[in-house]
Image (spheres, rainbow, N blue to C red):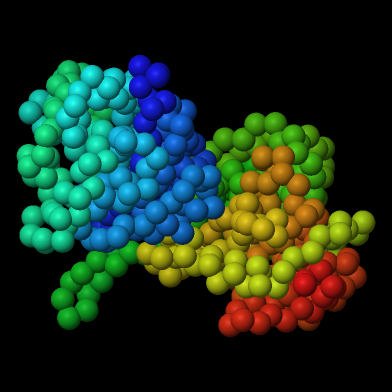
Amino acid sequence: MREATEQMSAALLCGGGSSRLGFPKEMVRVGGRPLGAVMADRLKEIFPSVIVISNESGFLRPHVDVPIYEDKSPGKGPLAGIEVGLTYCESDRCFFLAVDMPLVHNGLICRLVDAAAKSDAQAIVPKVSGHVQPVCGVYDQHLLVAAGECLSKGGSLSLAEFLQTIDTEYVQMDQADAGCFRDLDYPSDLAILRDGFEDVEPLPVQHILVRKTRPCHDLVVEEWPVAVYVNDIRLVTVMCLPSALRELAVGLASYLSLVQYTGAVGSISVDYEQKRVRMEVDVEDERIRKATQLLITSTCGANVYGSPLTVAEEAGEWTDFRVAADHILEVASGMRDMSPVFDRTGGTHQAAFTDGEEIQFFFEDIGRHNAVDKVVGRALMEGKSLEKGAIVTTGRISSEMVVKAVRAKVPVLASRSAVTIHACRLAKNYGLTLAGFARGGRLNAYTKPERIV
């Protein structure tokens, strides 16, 4: 069975507008990562070559290391995804799986692939209790022409109907397998994910009734008050997007100098019902209590920050990192395309860390501070040094943003937006390269411009 999978490619289908869910299904976060990234990694465990098909390729690009291709015929259903997958797969046959079927396990996949190895049919798909599951099956390269012709005709684009026009073998599944094919369509369906994943984050958007000439629904960004506890001491309550809360907590602790190195955080847990994050940190309780006294409410309304004059430290020796201005501009202009919550609501800031070649970490949040904290937090959690790279953000760079960069030892901090004079003074004092208005083919380098080439 393992030998059969080694002769075949796999494609993860992430098409569809997710209008009923209100959020791209592949970007629902499970286990601290987008669902699409988790499922792509699962497929990589059993297939030598994996690709992703998505109408919004920018969303997953910072999170996966496999090729992503967009539909040639967007809006025409899963058959369009099958066509693209067969075009770019690296084998005569390709296994396809829809991202909204996260409970289809590897054992079931191997059963289908094993059945395909014994069959000459053009398509091998499961059937359970009389219901065909066409977005979980094996398709032959020879179907490429037939799929293209069907798409070009218009009319009915049902994949199940397409299967009736070709040589299809239906693999009968037991009733016990029916639960594996439950799909993610509505917000209430997040319960399905909890059957397969320990940590399922809430949706960061919500449908709200809007009254215009006639009632309709609009998607509005979620904003949660999340209490952060360090060593059972309540540090602060942060207004934030209800996603990547562990990263947010670790990044905030880094900003307050409670976490200064990888491994300083012992355990960290999230209670979504109580809206709490608890973490254990290798630091004295007295330091935590002092940190709570430094926190004041941000005028941004989305985070908290301390007095930079109180908490900032000398950065020490910087690395010899250099980054191209064009790369900063490319990251700054591309972040919106990577932001599923912004795409649906227009209500978030974004932040990314790049090593000068490509984006390593990317997050969005309702607050510009939170987005940067999440980037720093993720780096600490993964043991990734930020000393050779740049943080690029969409938010205004004020003094506390400079402190975040200095504490994380990031040599370059840039934004699409403006900077404050106090931020410039601090950046100059600590040797940080500070750039603003990175948009429209230009940027302003206010301090240490020699790092931007």
Residue 103 sits above or below residue 316 on the image = above
Q: Quadrant of the C terminus?
A: bottom right
Seen from the viewer's position, the closer of residues 60 and 3 is 3
Tell me residue 96's x, y (percent).
30, 38
Tell me residue 244's x, y (percent).
54, 47
Q: Quadrant of residue 281?
A: top right
Q: Relative to residue 109, is residue 67 drawn left or right?
A: right
Tell me residue 320's x, y (percent).
86, 59
Residue 249 visible within the image: no
Q: Quadrant of residue 363?
A: bottom right
Q: Relative to residue 325, is residue 395 drawn left or right?
A: left
Residue 215 visible within the image: yes
In this rendering, the count of numbered labels is: 0
Seen from the viewer's position, the closer of residues 385 and 116 is 116
Residue at 50 percent of width and 53 percent of height: 61
Q: Relative to residue 322, is residue 251 drawn left or right?
A: left
Residue at 72 percent of width and 44 percent of height: 384
Residue at 26 percent of width and 33 percent of height: 138
Residue at 33 percent of width and 64 percent of height: 219
Seen from the viewer's position, the closer of residues 416 and 251 is 416
Q: Quadrant of residue 233?
A: top right
